Image (spheres, grey):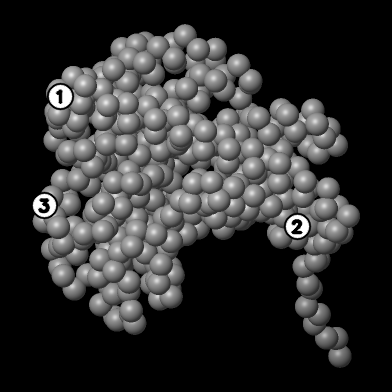
Amino acid sequence: MAQDTVRQAPVAPATPARGLLPLVLPALVVGVGASLLYLGVSGLATELQHALWENLPDALGVGRYSVLWMLVVLTTTGVLVGLVVWKAPGHAGPDPATLGLAGTAPLPYPVLPGLLLAAALMLAGGPSLGPENPILSANAALAFRLGRRAVPRLPGEAWAGLGEAATIGALFGTPFAAALLLSEALAGRPFRGLLWDNVFGPLVAAAAGALTTTLLARPSFDLDVPALGRPRWSDLLSAMAVASAAALLGMTAVYAFPYVHGAFRRLRHPMVALPAGGLVLGLLGGLGGRLTLFKGLDEVAVLARAPDAWSAGQFATLAVVKLAALLVAASCGFRGGRIFPSVFIGAALGLCAHALFPAVHPSVGVAAGVLGLLLAVTRHGWMSLFTATVLAPSPAMPALLCIASLPAWLLVTGRPQMQLREDGTALR
């Protein structure tokens, strides 16, 4: 009697140790270098921020965060960044609205100084964008071009991958975010060998970048919100509801993105579009206050330290104004990323839910709000889960957020993304 046989998929051959060991030293060098570049740009931006928002208004006798001063600084920031985009070689890189978090073609050397200068001016001046996209593009380009010259036997895409992973590790202070993002990228394309072999080099680079940042700057994503103890059924329902609401809020910006970007694009010249964007951001800052300025990571810590200090209406205002500011800043041409301001928006929405319904634990509200917003804005599921989890660490939180991500993901998957094609239409 014939017996049915079960066919097994061929097992991918493992890469021998001698094939992985040559990656260690290049990955360590790229990791340390990527972190130093990130810290250098961030340090320059911090010094400029102190000068613009503290020293200069004090010397002029103007309120540091008065509406007038917000309008002046943000409009001036638009003028300065517009000048860089207009005159710098390569116009400080491609239109940021067309870029995702990673995977872009390495930029030429002459473009990088203008891109980094535009990013530093943006971070100091107050537009609601983070440093991730410009720093990642610069580090990937430097790793690609310098690495191919130093070690020609390694392919160029491997060097670019090391630069991207190192930057993500440096930004988040941990290599896990880079590993999760890489696993998502590899899942969409064929790769040779075992998954762990493919992420070995990038994980070394991410760990080196994260450790360098941690030793030199001591960053922390822990917002110190009240810890979640033993979870209840109500916590699960709260997480699902808040994550879904945050995803819907984020999708409003996603659907508006092509239209707002198109309006600024019709202004044609960066010396018109960027100052106009800065003026709008100044008006939004006057409406939402100083907490709605800048990339949002330091500002969200202010909210999280005192979750009962604001009313539900105030939290809702902060979330909506910050979302509008993110939309304008990303549309008018400022060079920056969308992850860090999304963290602020999601946390403010979660704290709004806690203020409306005290049964919603503040940690659950913050983590679920950030999760839903990031899913809508980035479409990186693992990255969104990781970021939400580290903001409010608790042994029970990962399980709650994994379940809460399911309805939120159903709301965003297959729909337009907050990234545009060259013709201004949205990606799906």
Across and down, in percent, residue 397 comes to 39, 71
The quadrant of the picture occupied by the C terminus is: top left
Q: Secondary structure at mark 1?
A: loop
Q: Earlier in the sequence, mark 1 or mark 2?
A: 1
Q: Which mark is residue 62?
A: 1
Q: Earlier in the sequence, mark 3 or mark 2?
A: 2
Q: Secondary structure at mark 3?
A: helix
- Horizontal side, residue 412 vs residue 361: left or right: right
Residue beneath label 2, please? Answer: 197
Q: Is residue 128 above or below residue 376?
A: above
Under mark 1, the amino acid is Val
- Horizontal side, residue 172 vs residue 125: left or right: right
Q: Mark 1 and mark 3: span between their CA atoms? A: 29 Å
Q: Mark 1 and mark 2: span between their CA atoms? A: 57 Å
Q: Is residue 376 above or below residue 293?
A: below
Assess disc 3: are there few (<14), some (14-19) or many (≥20) residues with their C-alpha within 10 Å of its C-alpha. Answer: few
The mark closer to the camera, 1 or 3, is 1
Q: At 29% from the left edge and 81% from the top edge, which residue is drawn?
A: 232
Residue beneath label 3, please? Answer: 313
